[in-house]
Amino acid sequence: MEYFIYYLWIINTAAFFLSFYDKRAAVRHKQRIAERTLFILAAAGGSIGLYLSMLIFRHKTKHPSFMLGVPAIIAAQLLCLWYFFKA
């Protein structure tokens, strides 16, 4: 269980900072992080870090796929955790 907590901390931190990097790259017209990469990080457990960075940095908030998709991933992950710990 301890390793799982460490994993979640690392993946959420990575998602948070990659979103921050992508926002800075967008402002500076530099090479961006692919949206697919951000979604993969969210699905791999970094959804809360990605969602927080979206709100804090106001990044990807005009994209319905992100504003609906990331909360849907969070809900699915919470449902999986509930099911896992319920059993």
Image (cartoon, rainbow, N blue to C red):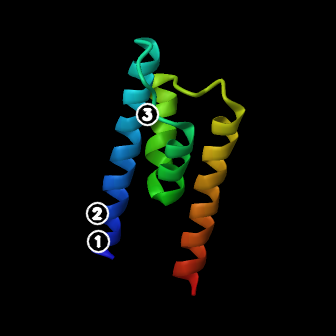
Q: Earlier in the sequence, mark 1 or mark 3?
A: 1
Q: Which mark is residue 3?
A: 1
Give the percent coordinates (x, y) of residue 37.
Answer: 50, 45
Secondary structure state at the residue bearing disc 3 = helix
Q: Is residue 62 above or below residue 11?
A: above
Q: Which numbered disc, 1 or 3, marks the residue closer to the eye? A: 3
Secondary structure state at the residue bearing disc 1 = helix
Give the percent coordinates (x, y) of residue 72.
Answer: 67, 51
Q: Identity of the amino acid at label 1? A: Tyr
Q: Which numbered disc, 3 or 2, marks the residue closer to the eye? A: 3
Q: Identity of the amino acid at label 2? A: Tyr
Q: Categorize mark 3 by other alpha carbons within 10 Å: few (<14), some (14-19), many (20+).
A: many
**In terms of image quadrants, where is residue 77?**
bottom right
Q: Residue at x 43, y 28 (%)?
A: 22
For mark 3, what is the residue?
Answer: 19
Q: Residue at x 61, y 27 (%)?
A: 61
Nearest the eye: 34 or 24: 34
Q: Earlier in the sequence, mark 3 or mark 2?
A: 2
